[in-house]
Amino acid sequence: MKFDYNLPVNLLFGRGRINEVGSEVAKYGKKVLIVTGRSSTKKSGLLDKTKNLLEEVKVEYEIFDRVEQNPLTTTVYEGVEAIKETGCDVILGLGGGSIMDAAKSIAFTAKNSGDISEYIFGIKQGKDALPIVLVPTTCGTGSEGNCFSVLTNPETKDKKSLRTNIIIAKASIIDPELMTTMPKGILASVGFDALAHNMEAYVSKIGQPLTDMKALYGIKLLAENLIKVYKNSNDLEAWEKVSLASTLGGMVIGVSGVTAPHGMEHPASGLYDIVHGKGLAALTPIIVERSWESNIEKYSDISKLLGGTDAKDCADSIKNFLEEINLKVTLGEFGIGEKDVDWMAENCIKVSKPSMINHPVKFTLEEIKDIYYKAL
């Protein structure tokens, strides 16, 4: 048995840890670019709280609040321009997965010139990045715990990850109390994304013992607690477990990668800017139906944790779980039609090749098309 496991990120986990954001940022710079969304951190009061905490430690700040739900490469360039204009020397990502991904890519592009797509596709290699501190406000991507930053190129519609250890955060503050203001629809989508991360890492061909045990624990935590917080947002103990599972999901995909569900979802949300978790919900059960025989033991483990009995009913267990959080959806509901299938399948081969290789079943182009058709 041989494997490597390297995750140089300082995770600060627990209720109330947001109060440490000022002192953490101050370790890495004197002026911070706060990358955040257009409204949620403002409405919740988190942005004002963060500004006050930064002022207490005499860290200056600028606000960059233009990030989309599927962040664009062009938005990253706008963030870099803001850095040039203001002289910020550290980045704080304050928000959900799209915010954290954008923050990481802004930190990267500030130190690496040229087209970021060339780095995403491995044509060029980056050398450095501005220091990054992340504060997730949703329990989905796990971006606080890995080296990924998913971006969409608005010209080509390619949605693909920048993957490099130089964008791993210096510190990630995971405070479950920050999650509790999420609307139910967002919670369902991001929570299923976290579940998908753990499930996909567990069955990935490049998984290893440390990722297996973390992914399995992440699935268990979400199976037992996501529905609880969906039905009762005041259950702070359940929020802790859901938040931990999300971070674990980010950590394990950083090593084991994602598989076919993410690989096939990215072309859909790259093309139509759909909510990532909803795209996963439409595709995952169908993909599992086509995959469970490839690893009966692991798909049985997943099914049992979700209330099923064996690998054969794993897809049904996932469907039942989705029903509990009102997330049984189809791609057709988001405007995707038969006319889009050929492009998505070809784009999947182009942008998601590693994810498709990681999957326990090798799907042909025609099989990928058939899955898309079934998901419409």
Image (spheres, rainbow, N blue to C red):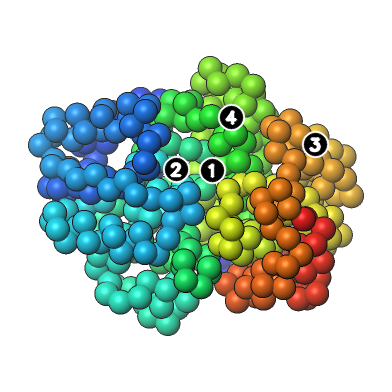
* Front: mark 4 or 2: 4
Residue 145 drawn at (x, y percent): 45, 49
Mark 1 in CB contact with mark 2 (< 8 angstroms): yes
Q: Judge whether residue 47 can be spotted in this image.
A: yes
Mark 1 in CB contact with mark 4 (< 8 angstroms): no
Residue 140, which numbered label?
A: 1
Identify the mark nearer the N-term, 4 or 2.
2
Query: Label 2 is placed on what type of residue?
Result: Gly
Residue 186 drawn at (x, y percent): 56, 36
Residue denoted by label 3: 320
Callout 1: SS: loop
Residue 96, which numbered label?
A: 2
Q: CA distance from mark 1 to mark 2?
A: 8 Å
Q: Quadrant of residue 149?
A: bottom left
* Front: mark 1 or 4: 4
Residue denoted by label 4: 184
Identify the mark nearer the N-term, 1 or 3.
1
